[in-house]
Image (cartoon, rainbow, N blue to C red):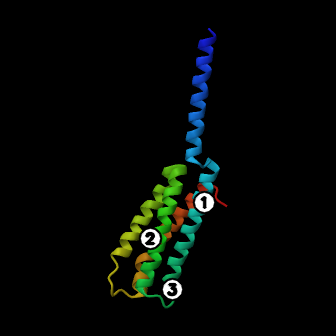
Amino acid sequence: MKAKALYTALVIGVLSLAAAAVACEEGQSQQELEAEACEDLTNLQDSLAGLEASLRGDSTVGEVRDAAENADAAFDEAQSSVGEVAETRIADVESAMDSLRNTIEDLPDDATLSQAADAIESDLAMVTDAVNETSDQLACP
């Protein structure tokens, strides 16, 4: 009987260690994952503001495209980190970003800044709204 109890205790101990190893390997708590997601969403918001700013003043269409690439890179980071917390929360942002990407890709090279701004502004507003909503759902500061 003692051998069975010892074996059971040993199995429970090994399973506990395995679970702890998996938890350590994952490395981040839910709070840490949410904090990272919030930080990445803030970076995305900042890059979207940069894109919006590029639509004003003396920017060229090339500079608008550069700002869009920065926003796209920030989105990739946010998509990854928010997806770790709650994949469904990033779906609206992804859809809006896809629309924005397509609009920017479809801009003719000889488009004026005014034409680029007219084409991009509604898609940019949809992305910004989706990011803000996701940030609110995660209760980001």
The residue furthest bottom is 58
x 49%, y 51%: residue: 87
Looking at the image, which residue sits at the far top?
Answer: 1
Q: Is residue 131 above or below residue 18?
A: below
* Residues tagged 2 and 1 counted as in contact (Cβ below 8 A): no
Structural distance between the alpha carbons of marks 3 and 1? 28 Å
Q: CA distance from mark 2 to mark 3?
A: 16 Å
Crowding at mark 3 (Cα within 10 Å: few <14, some 14-19, many 20+) = few
N-terminal label among 2 and 1: 1
Can you identify the residue that label 2 sits on? 123
Q: Nearer the viewer, mark 2 or mark 1?
A: 1
Q: Amino acid at mark 1?
A: Cys
User: Where residue 22 sits: x, y (%)?
Assistant: 55, 40
Query: What residue sits 48% from the left and 51% below the top?
Result: 88
Mark nearer the N terminus (3 vs 1)? 1
State the residue at coordinates (36%, 86%). Answer: 111
Circle 3: element type: loop
Along the polypeptide, which appears first: circle 2 or circle 3? 3
Nearer to us in this view, 94 or 43 = 43
Residue 108 occupies quadrant: bottom left
Please give the residue where the numbered disc 1 appears in the rendered image: 38
* Local SS, label 2: helix
Q: Is residue 100 left or right of residue 129?
A: left
13 is higher (above) or lower (below) than 91 = above
